[in-house]
Amino acid sequence: MRLLLLACCVSASLFVGEDAPDREAQQSIRAADVHADLLALASSTLEGRDTPSLGQARAAGHIAGRLEAAGFVGAGPEGSFLWPFTQRHPAPVPEDCSLARTDGSREFEYGRDFVPVWGGSGEARGATVFLGFGIDADADRFDELRGHDLAGRVAILIEGEPRHRRVLEGPEVSREADLYVKIARLETEGIAGVLVVRRPPEEGSDGRETGDAALAPLARLGFRHSWAAWSVEAPSRVRFVEFPVLEITPQVARELVGIDVLKAAEDIDRTGRPFKGQYGGIDVTLKARCEQRDVTAYNVVGRLAGSDPALADEFVVLGAHYDHVGIDPRGRIGHGADDNASGTSALLEVAEALSRDRPRRSILACAFAAEEDGLAGSRAFCKTPSVPSGSLIAMVNLDMVGRGERDEVAAIGLIKNPGLDKLLTRANKLTKTGIKRIVRRQGQELFNRSDHYSFHVIGVPTLFFFEGLPITQNRDYHTWRDTVDKVDVEKVAATARLTFNTVWLLANDDERPPRPEY
């Protein structure tokens, strides 16, 4: 009996003791919670979380709310969770953008009813004409321009193409859906201006359960500062024209056309036939102008105070980028479920677990924007961090942790930080994580491609958890196919447990890890 009791005590010490985290803290990391955050962050209504965008702002609000609920406080200006930085982007000049009925009965609101499209500029006046999707594809016998005299008119058309399994290229969205292809064709017809209707995403198109409350559309229209480009095809080319092009809501289109354009789109979806009929005829005036400007974007940064007064002024950074590439001119959304809603969801689980067993050192939880723009968000943060850079003792990064073998993870950065090798082994033995194989000292070609690298540059030891090597085994990387249904939430949770143990050790060990080797 005494031997049995001794064995039980030894077993328990692997979970609870001076050098192990609290059992309930580590067990609070659950696949179901990961899934809930994935659904919120990779929703079609967030339109791919491009930097900057309204969809990204909505994602930032979700992350900040989760961190605050876990007991973190804002580490941005004036205690905010939002840490601002600027980027150079095409941006509207709002005072030179307008849409109104010429009879003076209706002036539409910038940002709620319409926004300009990058590439179209100027002023126009003309009668509206509804063209369905505005597609002219003779080879596919789908021509919605035939029979219309378009010279001097203002075309109203729906973004994308019909959702029909046999029209054009069937399930794959064709080149004819590209907004700039449509604009180029309309330019040859002498069009005066173009109004493009933003169509809500197809229900369930992101692999989530249909009818989920998080599918509620954004209340406003956001200008698309950039368009998504994919790893599997050449990017679309912006068409610069000397007439205004605006994006409008379906409600505005209904006012200017006289029919429910979303219902018209559904009819085309069902029949697969080009839209026919003459609708519109309402005279409007419109203006658009854009230029390169400094635009504000936001990292989300929260701080959890350490429990040891002697070490609380030192910080372990827990990081993941929450941005993705947005939406392309064909209307395809880069949901970024694996890249990197998976890492962000893991970060939130780790942050919550750390708040349940507060370590000696403090924690900075950083969700970075603009990683897809060359690590711009983390580089800006490391240039002027919210705490002294000398107080940053280590950075652990989570980027793409939801695909590949469930019990495997790659730990990139050990070549530059060999002092973290033994700590990583301790972390995976500290408790049961679900990770059986850690790929070490490989993937160095990815070392400078995620946000930990910005910290490496300023001398902070870093470790980058990644789903598995090589990256080419993930065929959905940087495509519109990176959806929630393809993410292994059990693997994300297992990686989060390993990350929790790693951060917990870094934040509790007496000694700081050695600086990187260059």
Image: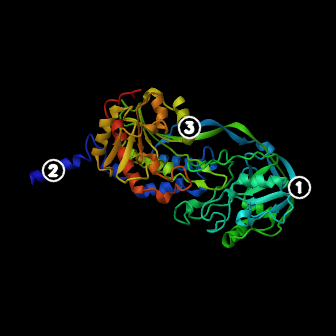
The residue depicted at 52 percent of the width and 61 percent of the height is 207
Whether residue 493 sits left or right of residue 190 in the image: it is left
| Residue farthest front in this picture | 139
Q: Of discs 1 and 3, which sits in the foreground?
A: 3
Q: Mark 1 points at which residue?
A: 102
Q: Which of marks 2 and 1 is nearer the N terminus?
A: 2
Q: How crowded is mark 1: few (under 14 residues within 10 Å), some or many (20 or more)?
A: some
| Residue farthest right in this picture | 103
- Label for residue 374? 3
Quadrant for residue 122, please give it: top right
- Residue 13 in the image: x percent, y percent? 22, 46
Q: What whole-number distance in Å separates the C-alpha atoms at marks 2 and 1?
A: 85 Å
Up-down relation of residue 518 to residue 289 (above or below): above
Could one spot residue 106 in this view of the protein? Answer: yes
Q: Of discs 3 and 2, which sits in the foreground?
A: 3
Q: Tell me which amino acid carries mark 2.
A: Ala
Q: Which colour scheme is used?
A: rainbow
- Label for residue 7? 2
Closest to the observer, 253 or 407: 407
